[in-house]
Each structure stands twice: as structure tokens, then as C-alpha cells.
Image: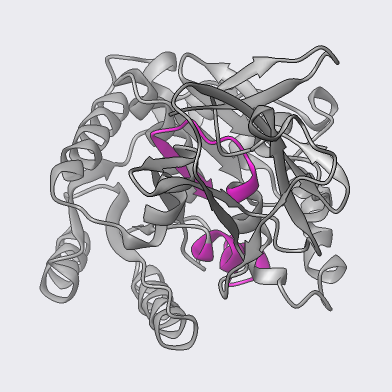
Amino acid sequence: MRVIALANQKGGCGKTTVSTNLAAALAQLDKKVLLIDNDPQGHATLAFGIRERDFTLSTYDLYLTTDILVEDAFLDVGPQLHLVPAGIELSAVDQALARDPDKDQRLRNCFRRSAMPYDYILIDCPPSVSLLTFNALLASGEVIIPVDPSYYSLQALRKMRETLTVLREKRGHDLVPQVLMSNFDTRPLFVRKIMEELEEVYGRELLDTIIHHTVRFREAAGSGLPVIRHDPQSRGAHDFQVLAREITDQEVDLKINAIDHWTALLHGPQVSESGVLFEADFPRARNVRITGSFCDWSAQGLPLERRADGMWECRLTLEAGKHQYRFIVDGTWLPDPHNSQTVANEFGGANSLVVV
């Protein structure tokens, strides 16, 4: 799973155009994609023809409601493509979380609690270095920085790179940056000079694909469709198909340490010769236990220990076979949110399943 933020503090550089159309192009390649609208303007939501009256849960709830997970909030907007929508209420997140010590990791923590069966997660960020943007960057392993052909955008790109340096030095979070030329008409001389400067300064980070200027993007947004559905034969559709292939072709060589731990979590319990390792991501819990068929569903359960990183874990020796289980989090019985293997129980819910 790759988590990619689309970020640049300058407005009008094509973040939403890139995030929505890249998401659709990746889904067209049979990748399972989640797009999160992380901008209070809600333009990524509007790009799919969705208005605020069309949804109840949104990105706002992922930040402020700990029992709302991604699977509760997403909308199905196409084959292999889910969207968590956003509206103007998202602008209240900064003030609501002002005194929260974990305010810049709310989105990351929500991801850890949620079932995330995706190949790609794209996060469309607001045109500012705000709490919403920091949450997106800390939740991501990569960042695509769209740059339009202007010297203001070059300045914003430098500022964005400075922000990434601060995250690496102050927070130990190292993102893989990729610069994308967006909305480029390559004919004017000044545009070619900007292209030369980008190649000279950011050559190793510069994506090969260029998203060319075309009115089809505005037409597609107005129709509530990605450009590959609005006009599949257009140059814009072709550009994003090429970009999607370039992104997927990186999978062989690109290593993103920031999300390795999440990938392990999404596989559920880890079975080895030394036993079964159960991990639980409940950072605010005071007590976490596990119960299941292996202990006759004891109401006391077996204790997990909190690690230094805030995760809970225990290792159990289980007999060969299938075992159902649940976590007991501060007295509340919950299935394992990171284990997709479940079986229905007699109470109308589901128990998590591990096979030894």
C-alpha cells in the first residue's frame, strides 16, 4: 500500500486536478484506490459530482470522531475507486484540535485503526501549510508536488521542500518527494525556461510525465467526471494514463519505510514458529486485552503490553487450526480492525479469525 499526499502551499497549481484524475487512472489499471478530500473547499468531492447534501460522514469525522473509520465514511465513486468527501466543516479542525497533543497525527491514527485494503491512498491537501496538510504529510510515505508554469510556483516548491526537511529533522518522518509539471503549455519560451530550471534543480525528483494544459480538465470537473471518463481520447486523459503507469512502474524499486509498519498491520496477526504476534493500535486506551476461542472467550481475556511507540502487543502459542478472537479495549469488545479475516458471530457482528 502506498500513501501519497498531493501538496503545495500555492493555490491553482493543479493539486485537485492531479489527485482526482490520477486516482481514476490508477483505478483504471485495476488498482484499488482511496482518495481522501483533505481540503475544506471540497473540490475533489465536487469533481465527482458530489455536493455536501449528498453525504453525511466526511474527512471531518475522521479527524474528530475516533469511532468513525475510513470504511464508515467513504463513497463508491467508480470501479476500484473510493472517495472520503469533504465540505466546509473541515475548516473547523484546526481550532477543534488546538490543544490536542496528537493533533498532527489524527489522520495517521485513523488509518491505523481502519481497514485499508487499498493499493493506493491519495490525499488532496489544501493550498497552505496547515494542520490538515501536516496530518496528510505525516500519514503519507510520499508526496507529489504539482507545479504550474510560474515563478510563484517555483518559490512555493522551495518552501514545500523546506517543510519536508523540517519533518525529517524534527519528527524523523522522511517522505519521498516527487515533482510533477502540471497544466504546462510547453510552447512559450518562459515555460521552457521553467522546465529547464526544474530539471536542473529537481532532476532526481522530477517525474517524467508532463500534464499538459487543456480545457478538457475544466469541462470534466464541470460534468462531475474524471477526464478519462469525460473524454477518454483527449490529451488530458492520455497524460494521466501515462502518469499512472509511471507511478505503478516505480513499485519494483521504490521503498517507502514510512508505511511498512501499516502494511504489516493490515495482514493481521503474524504467525511464526515462536507463536502468534497480535498487535493493536489503540493509542488512547488504558487497558487492552484479547479473548477468543483459545481461552473459552474469557471475559477477563489475556493482557497486551503497551510498547514505547504506543502500540499494544502480545505473543500467544496457539494450536494448529482456526481461532476466533476479539480485543477488549477498556472494557469494550472490538474486532481487530487490521485483520480482514472475519467470521459472523451469534450476536450479528463479526469475530476476527487467525489460522495457525
From this view, report whether residue 134 is shown above or below residue 139.
Answer: below
Q: Residue at x 33, y 72 (%)?
A: 154
Q: Residue at x 36, y 66 (%)?
A: 175
For this view, does 31 lie left or right of residue 58?
A: left
- In the rendered image, residue 134, in percent from the top left (x then y), is placed at 58, 69
- In the rendered image, residue 220, in percent from the top left (x then y), is placed at 49, 24
User: Which region shows up in magenta?
Assistant: 112-138
Could you tell me which quadrant the N terminus lies in?
top left
From this view, report whether residue 265 is shown above or below residue 321.
Answer: below
| Quarter location, residue 107 | bottom right
- In the rendered image, residue 93, in percent from the top left (x then y), is placed at 79, 61
Q: Residue at x 40, y 38 (%)?
A: 120
For this view, does 355 lie left or right of residue 59?
A: left
> Could you tell me if residue 47 is visible in this image?
no
Is residue 129 located in the magenta-colored stretch of the structure? Answer: yes
> Could you tell me if residue 7 is visible in this image?
yes
- In the rendered image, residue 55, in percent from the top left (x then y), is placed at 80, 27
